[in-house]
Amino acid sequence: MKAIIIEQYGGKEQLKEADVPKPAPGEHQVIVKLHATSINPIDWKLREGYLKTMMPFDFPIILGWDAAGVVDEVGAQVTKFKAGDRVFARPETTNRGIYAEYTAVDAHLLAKIPENLSFEEAACVPLAGLTAWQCLFDFGNIQKGQKVLIHAGAGGVGTFAIQLAKEAGAYVAATAGTHNVDLLKSLGADEVIDYKKQDFEKVLREYDFVLDSLGGENQEKSFTVLKNGGKLASIVSEPDPEKAAQKNIKSGNVWLKPNGSQLARMAELLERNKLKVIIGHRFPLSEEGIREAHAISESHHAKGKIVIEIR
């Protein structure tokens, strides 16, 4: 099968097309004939070698951890899925990812794609959607009426987090550049802070929860907008424990755990049009396509999700 692989860590030029064996299913696995995937920062961070200590994979590595496609084969112990089912998943993080024509996924991590969703839309949901879900609900336990700040609201995680927090009944503020203010309002944000014109820490007060996807100075300033006893979830780095202790803030670096049942709950929201997918960029499954997609993701200025169309 066709796949885009890396054989050593480094820049975008390491992404190369190759012919690799089609996987066979384990007893509890499903082989998915892939129709689409999407790009996430973990892809290029791993390609560059930033995560090699945490994930000491053997080469060659197929990157990508958002799967959307059709069930091709099922393992002997799989009963919930059959050939032909439209499915999506955030698979376990292994060296056999999704920049390929087929992939093996543990059946308990799969969910069925709602009929009203395309494969491209479905491919945008698992990693970014589950990250937003686990930050807001597993870590933050956000409740109706609480005040929530979402940084980088126009990004992959941000667009889902705004909608999920609104669906939960929270008051949502989000940060974005001038050109994305209207997009975030259309997703339901009650207040959008244009970071090119305003400093969020001077505008917002007494927030219950902050989702930080930027780190650095933005993360430091986020402590000032949180109320005593608030919560700060970061998806980039561990927040300063001393700053957190000063205001009795629960803070932490949230690392996504693949979860098929949570994805199925998101599928229900998508089916009821309570959640929509924002696709900002589309590329083919090719060396050039993946390299261009990585460049956009690395710029930190992607709008919504970056999709790779596999077939």
Image: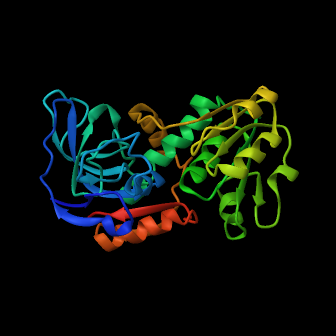
Q: Quadrant of residue 234?
A: top right
Position of residue 13 relative to residue 211, above or below, is below
Image quarter where the C terminus lies is bottom left
Q: Which residue occupies 84% across, 38% down?
A: 206
The residue closer to the viewer here, 210 or 234, is 234
Numbered circles on residues, count: 0
The location of residue 198, given as percent across then percent down, is: 83, 61
Q: Is residue 85 left or right of residue 169?
A: left
The location of residue 145, given as percent across then percent down, is: 77, 34
Q: Which residue occupies 33% across, 74% down?
A: 288
Residue 284 in view here = no
Q: Which residue occupies 41% across, 33% down?
A: 259
Q: Is residue 262 left or right of residue 113?
A: right
Q: Which residue occupies 71% across, 64% down?
A: 181
The location of residue 227, given as percent across then percent down, is: 82, 33
The location of residue 91, given as percent across then percent down, is: 34, 41
Position of residue 84 relative to residue 179, above or below, is above
The residue closer to the viewer here, 61 or 269, is 61
The residue closer to the viewer here, 229 or 51, is 51
